[in-house]
């Protein structure tokens, strides 16, 4: 394993930086990032034919790590595991890591611990529910144990939930900061579950970036890819399941909201929203019980989102291309648009890249791209065409 810095300018060299030292020479790698996940992950490995070389022993779970491809930062987070295997001739060392946002997935917020206590509990009972001095962050429970936010923006609440873990929150949606909500953390709730519950009715993309920040993002915020995906040009392989088992003719969302002296009974307990898909020619009903405060309008929007998202998933496809960079030297990125021209799968359309996987093995570097019609993530209720092939003469026309 090489610990020298990259002086060759190799754009595709994988390295990690730990405690000021750069580790290179990895023989295999896999790096995954997706708009459906708030935590990107990587696995690197190297086989050492000389068991006497133990440089890898410097790497330990819990260390901060920055993963780079060339000089492009791809992931900022922590080493999560360092498996080792060996035989008589060699030792194989593996380094696994995840974005800083991994703590939001694995851990609860301090408020989730306080929420499980009686309301009369004192703050001193929770003096241990705080981050360590090493992190220089401390969350002190209120003197009157309070697990709720009132008249706050979702971004402020999410920032409070992420602060104990040193994760910054970036909101790219201009009109979202004007929204005012009330929110309460459930006992024992993971941070990611609190965030999902808070945002579930907004149909937003919540993911991470290369610096380990949590990002509330607009669809396609990473712009247009410079390269298209074209059969006979750069596609090595492609696939699509076209699985209709999760498509329904009717989507019914049931909910309820808080009553008042003027509104009570069935008027608050039977909120309902219906969306129908005329492309499904037989009766197939899906009923979803919504959580939290609802309304007929909220339920209707959720039903339309379920219909649109599921139809977009039906048209999702995977393509592999050689290398990790496009012709302009940019890395492929999730949440960017790409033109797909695949007559084998009967897809000719602009798709949203949902997931990017970089892999390195004996065959070289490969990128796997999972793409989906952008309308599937459009919170404003765009529709997905029923056919597999776009009739537009120029698929880029709508996004130029």
Image: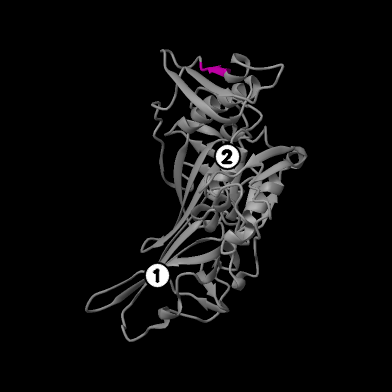
Crowdedness of circle 2 by 10 Å Cα count: few (<14), some, many (20+)? Answer: some
143 horizontally vs 383: left or right: right
Position of the C terminus, as image quadrant, is top right
Question: Where is residue 240 shown, x and y percent of the image?
Answer: 41, 36
Would residue 387 be seen by someone viewing this image from the given angle? yes
The quadrant where residue 185 appears: top right
Helix, strand or loop under label 2:
helix
Q: Residue at x 47, y 36 (%)?
A: 316
Disc number at residue 82?
1
In front: label 2 or label 1: 2
Would residue 223 be seen by someone viewing this image from the given angle? no
* In this view, 92 is above or below 236: below
Q: Which residues are magenta?
A: 270-277
Q: Residue furthest bottom?
A: 52
Question: Which residue matches tag 2?
Answer: 197
Q: Residue at x 50, y 27 (%)?
A: 311
Question: Where is residue 249 shown, x and y percent of the image?
Answer: 46, 17
Crowdedness of circle 1 by 10 Å Cα count: few (<14), some, many (20+)? Answer: some
Please name the predominant secondary structure of the magenta segment in the image: strand
Q: Magenta segment: does it hold 187?
A: no
* In this view, 152 is above or below 245: below
Q: Residue furthest left?
A: 88
Helix, strand or loop under label 1:
loop
Dot 2 and dot 1 residues touching (CB under 8 Å): no
**Mark 2 or mark 1: which comes first in sequence?**
1
Between the residue at mark 2 and the residue at mark 1, the CA separation in whole angstroms equals: 33 Å
Disc number at residue 6?
none
């Amino acid at each position: 394993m090489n610990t020298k810095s990259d002086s060759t300018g190799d754009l595709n060299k994988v390295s990690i930086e730990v405690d000021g030292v750069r580790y290179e020479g990895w023989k295999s790698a896999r790096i995954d990032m997706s708009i459906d996940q708030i935590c990107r992950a990587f696995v690197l490995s190297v086989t050492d034919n000389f068991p006497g070389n133990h440089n890898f022993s410097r790497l330990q779970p819990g260390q901060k790590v920055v993963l780079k491809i060339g000089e492009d930062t791809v992931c900022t987070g922590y080493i999560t595991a360092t498996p080792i295997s060996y035989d008589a001739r060699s030792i194989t060392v593996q380094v696994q890591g995840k974005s800083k946002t991994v703590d939001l997935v694995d851990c609860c917020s301090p408020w989730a611990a306080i929420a499980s206590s009686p309301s009369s509990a004192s703050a001193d009972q929770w003096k241990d529910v705080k981050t360590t001095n090493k992190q220089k962050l401390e969350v002190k429970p209120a003197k009157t144990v309070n697990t709720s936010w009132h008249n706050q923006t979702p971004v402020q609440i999410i920032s409070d939930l992420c602060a104990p873990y040193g994760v910054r929150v970036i909101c790219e949606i201009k009109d979202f900061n004007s929204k005012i909500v009330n929110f309460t953390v459930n006992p024992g709730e993971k941070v990611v579950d609190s965030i999902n519950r808070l945002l579930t009715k907004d149909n937003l993309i919540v993911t991470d970036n290369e610096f380990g920040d949590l990002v509330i993002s607009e669809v396609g915020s990473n712009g247009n890819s410079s390269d298209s995906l074209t059969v006979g040009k750069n596609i090595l392989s492609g696939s699509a399941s076209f699985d209709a088992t999760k498509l329904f003719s009717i989507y019914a969302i049931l909910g309820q909201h808080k009553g008042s002296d003027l509104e009570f009974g069935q008027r608050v307990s039977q909120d309902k929203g219906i969306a129908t898909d005329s492309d499904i020619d037989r009766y197939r009903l899906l009923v979803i019980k919504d959580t939290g405060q609802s309304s007929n309008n909220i339920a209707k929007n959720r039903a339309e989102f379920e219909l649109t998202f599921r139809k977009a998933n039906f048209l999702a496809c995977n393509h592999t291309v050689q290398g990790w960079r496009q012709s302009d030297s940019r890395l492929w990125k999730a949440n960017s648009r790409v033109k797909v021209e695949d007559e084998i799968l009967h897809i000719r359309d602009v798709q949203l890249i949902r997931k990017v996987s970089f892999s390195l093995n004996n065959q070289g570097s490969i990128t796997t791209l999972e793409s989906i019609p952008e309308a599937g993530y459009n919170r404003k209720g765009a529709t997905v065409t029923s056919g597999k092939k776009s009739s537009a003469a120029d698929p880029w026309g709508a996004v130029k």
